[in-house]
Image: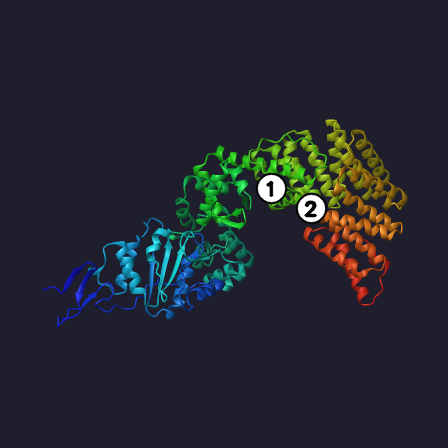
Amino acid sequence: MSNRIDTVHGKVVQAADVHGDVVLVDVNLHPTVPAPVPRQLPLQSKDFTGRASHVEALNSLLLGPGMSPPVLLTGSAGVGKTTLAVHWAHSSGESFPDGLLYADLHGFTPDQVETASIQVLKRFLKALGTRPEFLPDDLDGCAAAYRTLLADRKVLVVLDNVGSAAQVRPLLTASTKCRLLLTSRTRLAGLDIERLPVEVFSSAESDGLLRRILGAERVDEEPAVAVRIALQCARLPLALRVAAERLRHRPHYTLADLSAELDDERLSALELPGDVLMAVGPAISLSYRSLDPCSAKVFRLLGVQACADSSEQAVVALTRLEPRQVRKSLAFLLDAHLLEEVEHGRYRFHDLLRAYARQQAAEVDSTEDRFAAILGLTTWYASMADHADRTLAGHRARRHLDLREDAHKVEFASHDEAMKWCDAELVNIESCLEQAHPLGLRDLVWQVPAALQGFFNLTKHLSVWCDSHGLGLAAATAGNDLAGTALMHHGLACGYRYRQDDEKAVIHGVRALDGFRELGDRRFQGIVLSNLGLSYFCLGQYDEAHERLEESLRAAQEVGDRHAEAWALTNLGSVHRRQDEFGKSLERLLLAVRIRDEIGDLDGEAWTRDELGRTCANLGRSEDAVEAFDRAIDLHRANSNVYGLARVLHHLALHLVGTGQEERARAAGAEALQIFDRLGSSDASALRLLLAALDQVRTGTPLRPDDLRS
């Protein structure tokens, strides 16, 4: 006679021979045979390094008293989620005396199907002592039995490589004693869990892993190359491990050899033969293959362009997709950790993801489609730069650029908004132009820096200023574009003047002047002449300087350009001051201030009042000088003109020292020095001498006249 009885609650058995009342025991809840304590964790890496903050966070989240929600380690392919989870589980095993359960759900495993939830549940139930013949047949029954068995046990459940929320949901438990640690490439939206992002290694962690695998001596032989390899591997733990393993048993293969190979074939060099799990490309491909067609296209085209990061609007221009589609695709890419959001609305991926995306684009997208992507992005940058320039420098003279039509231009509501856009995109614009130039987009390559002239005037980003105009000059010259060539020469003349390289400034200024004369553009002739006049003066060619500046003034008056007229007067005032002609300087500058005020040119007014302050100081009119400097400072702050601000603060500091106001002078000088250092300006050296001299005053050492020279 069988001891098993089928009931509405499932299979039950007699606990023993029947003596009196029948006692039924549910075998799903009380296994008849004691099972060994499960210890299912896979082997942990002997080279584990770093992740101290993550280990600390896991200790806090999973080892405390009371109920704890499941913790998800989420990050991109190859970032080391499994390595971290297994390491922590091994190190914390003593806290879970009733067992360590582990399952790889194969959500992202090469050539392997996702593990069904019911398979994992049945495996866990057997590990916890349930006899195979008494396992429930359905998912709900298995999940209920699993939760019941874990209710009073201190067990750690590690669910690795989860593919989706639906896959893992039946494996979650509300036990106050049991703890769950999950890993996934996605964020598993919809689950009430604690998420702990796992990023690429820091520089120190990257160095630590290379040393653990290769030995400190080998890394110390080529320390700079080791740093380079870490960067080539995007500090991705899987990539670093593969790279190091390729070197471990090849003593004559140097770090430099590997670095050169990574330069040539980045992804193929990061594979170990015969081990698909130790290869970066296949690891990324699993995440890529899970994307819908639209998101896959966005991913590929992001790899085509060279920008460091991208805004949503830039992605729209790049892909020519509707904003709604782009927004949705970016969300999918973020969730799959194929993209990261570096700040609100700005996205990027590391170099290995970029290499994979570019590789896929070369295989999937036609040459025409890839060219169209760069054309769309560069056109958008040109359109946006032009609009930013009109917002930032409405009074600036500009030639019509005949820009290509762009449907995705975003309007700027304010000066600050335009400045923020330019600041955020400047590095990307430079990369975009370098990519567009060899593709033959000559008009755009010079139009973008031409449109950014107002921004460059405000910020004095001299390196990008000169580099972008140099590239633009090459493009305009190759295209036989006279207007573009003249504008680029003028931009270079201005940039070199601010770099205090007046010889180059004159060379480019003369060529710009020739170009605008050939074009018959009297207005721009006057603007170029004004800049040339200052450069000639700095080179000691005073007669030439006055001649150019007076001609600049006449040209501005002829065409009715009051903005250019005010600049010519300001520059003449500056030259008169430097020649100790303070009365003439004052006359010119007061007239320039009046014009600036009449046309509402606040940025120009700040520059003129700075010169006015210096002239008043030379005339002994200290109160007027300070008033002019203070007004210039306020205007430059309002216009976000950091170089202009630092320049006025420097001049104010010099004047205050001369009037015995050392403390206020020190404050103004210190603020100016901070800005000059940030901009890499050569003005910093003179200011540093002044501040050192002011420190002498504090110690009681008298100032010498040479200490105040600038």
Mark 1 secondary-structure assignment: helix
Left or right: 341 with respect to 628?
left
Question: Please, what secondary structure does the residue beneath circle 2 have?
Answer: helix
Residue 694 sits in which quadrant? bottom right
Q: Amino acid at mark 1?
A: Ile
Residue 492: x percent and y percent?
71, 39
User: Do callouts 2 and 1 mark residues in contact (Cβ within 8 Å)?
Assistant: no
Indicate which disc, 2 or 1, sits on the residue closer to the N terminus: 1
Q: Is residue 518 above or below residue 254?
A: above
* x and y percentages locating residue 478 in the rendered image: 63, 31
**Which residue matches tag 1?**
429
Quadrant where the N terminus lies?
A: bottom left
**Label 2 Cα crowd, 10 Å radius (few <14 / some 14-19 / many 20+):** some
Q: Which residue is mark 2?
A: 459
Which amino acid type corresponds to the residue marked 2 in the rendered image?
Thr
| Horizontal relation, residue 425 to residue 369: left or right | right
Nearer to us: label 2 or label 1: 2
